[in-house]
Image: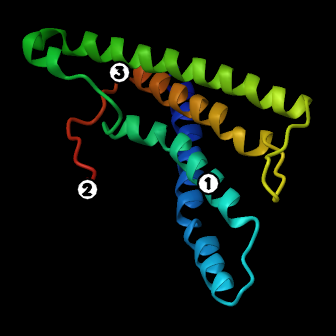
Amino acid sequence: MRHFARWLERAASLLTVVSIAAIALLAFPLFYDAIARKFGAPTIWVFDVSQYALIAGAFLANAYALARGNHFRVQILFGVFPRLRRALDDIALASVLAFGIVIAYGGGLLVHYSFANDIHSASLFDVALYIPQAAVPLGGFALAAQALAMLILRATPAESSDFGE
């Protein structure tokens, strides 16, 4: 079972790398568009691409945030019931797992609907919307995978919410 949990962590980590790449690469099209507009040749694709990359980056980074303790957490009960900390962490991780599954499933339905009906963006770039929408179920999968791995490995999110660590 630990091997499966490690595989889930690697899958979530891979999607984290994709998230980092998507956000890091945002600077290039924005820089290009600023220069192109300066010379009177604005682009039709930069807004769409940068918007979709930012959304994908945010969804795919959820697993990383959960593993590092920077995901949403309610810690008020830890002080009131210190002996129940492990159980409360397990309940929280199970809730995140369920939430990730719902997001993955619902996002999958959205992607399927857009693909089956050949839905495209209303912009001039005319993107097939199932492509950027795929970030939703992938992000849900990454979140669920990380939560399940943490439950199996009995790991708790990091104590610190300091983003500098």
Residue at 41% from the left image edge and 26% from the top image edge: 150
Label pair 1/2, CB-CB below 8 angstroms? no
Mark 1 or mark 2: whose residue is earlier in sequence: 1
Give how far apart the Cα atoms at labels 1 and 3 are: 37 Å
**150 left or right, relative to 32:** left
Name, please, the residue furthest toward the bottom.
Answer: 39
Name the residue beneath numbered marker 1: 51
Which mark's residue is nearer the viewer, 1 or 2?
1
Residue at 48% from the left image edge and 30% from the top image edge: 146
**Could you say whether the residue bearing mark 2 is in a helix, strand or loop?**
loop
Q: Is residue 7 above or below residue 87?
A: below
Give how far apart the Cα atoms at labels 3 and 2 are: 25 Å
**Could you say whether the residue bearing mark 3 is in a helix, strand or loop?**
loop
Mark 3, other Cα within 10 Å: few <14 / some 14–19 / many ≥20:
few
Residue 38 quadrant:
bottom right
**68 left or right, relative to 31:** left
What kind of residue is marked 3?
Arg
What kind of residue is marked 2?
Gly
**153 left or right, relative to 31:** left
Residue at 65% from the left image edge and 40% from the top image edge: 135
Name the residue beneath numbered marker 3: 154
Give how far apart the Cα atoms at labels 1 and 2 are: 26 Å
Which mark's residue is nearer the viewer, 3 or 2?
2
Name the residue beneath numbered marker 2: 164
Residue at 34% from the left image edge and 27% from the top image edge: 155
Label pair 1/3, CB-CB below 8 angstroms? no
Q: How far across and how far down the image is residue 41, in percent? A: 75, 83
